[in-house]
Amino acid sequence: MKLSKALNTFYYSTALCDLRLMNKQIVDENITYNSLLYMDIIYTMNGTCTVSKLAEMLHVSKPGVTAKVNELLRQGVITKTPAPEDKRKHYLAINDEAISQYKFYRKQNLKAIKRITESFTTEEINQFCKMLDMISEINFEEINGG
């Protein structure tokens, strides 16, 4: 399989899997695909996410992001904590109780990790991680206008 075809298939299968999980609305009918996108970003930023950073990353207006964040706060999916260095700034995180719901949507990742660790050596997995990091770096360069 060519690298470009494998990469395209990976992106396609991931997007399709996410959309199908969202359309089933198994866990919570209020968790939309858009909500999951916000949750992914907040979770990945590991306690450093702010409304401003979300707006910048998504190229969405700050009031639009604030409205979505307020919706997720009302649903109890995320938390908002004042920054110790500046009380005007707030950090967003996934609510501990919501993490199990969030992880349900990522169950395919857990299956992939299990199969990969059973099938490949540590060195091969490290090489794969470097490749994924490279793809992420390129994506973030594109996101940031590079």
Image (spheres, grey):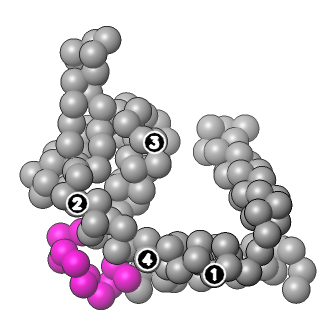
For the point 21% across and 36% down, the residue is 80
Give the crowd class for mark 4: few <14, some 14-19, many >=20 residues within 10 Å: few
Which label sits in the foreground, 4 or 3? 4
Nearer to us: label 2 or label 1: 1
Q: CA distance from mark 3 to mark 2?
A: 16 Å
**What residue would you read off at disc 1?**
115
Residue at mark 2 to residue at mark 1: CA–CA distance:
26 Å
Pointer 2 residue:
98
Give SS at disc 3.
loop
SS for callout 4: helix
Q: Is residue 131 something that shows in the picture?
A: no
Please provide the residue range marked out in magenta.
21-31
Cα separation between marks 3 and 1? 26 Å
The amino acid type found where label 1 is placed reads Arg
Q: Position of residue 82 (x, y in %)?
A: 22, 24
> Can you tell which quarter of the image residue 143 is in?
top right
Kind of residue at disc 4: Lys
Callout 3 environment at 10 Å: few (<14), some (14 to 19), or many (20+)? Answer: some
| Of callouts 2 and 1, the N-terminal one | 2
Q: In the rendered image, which quarter contains the N terminus?
A: bottom right
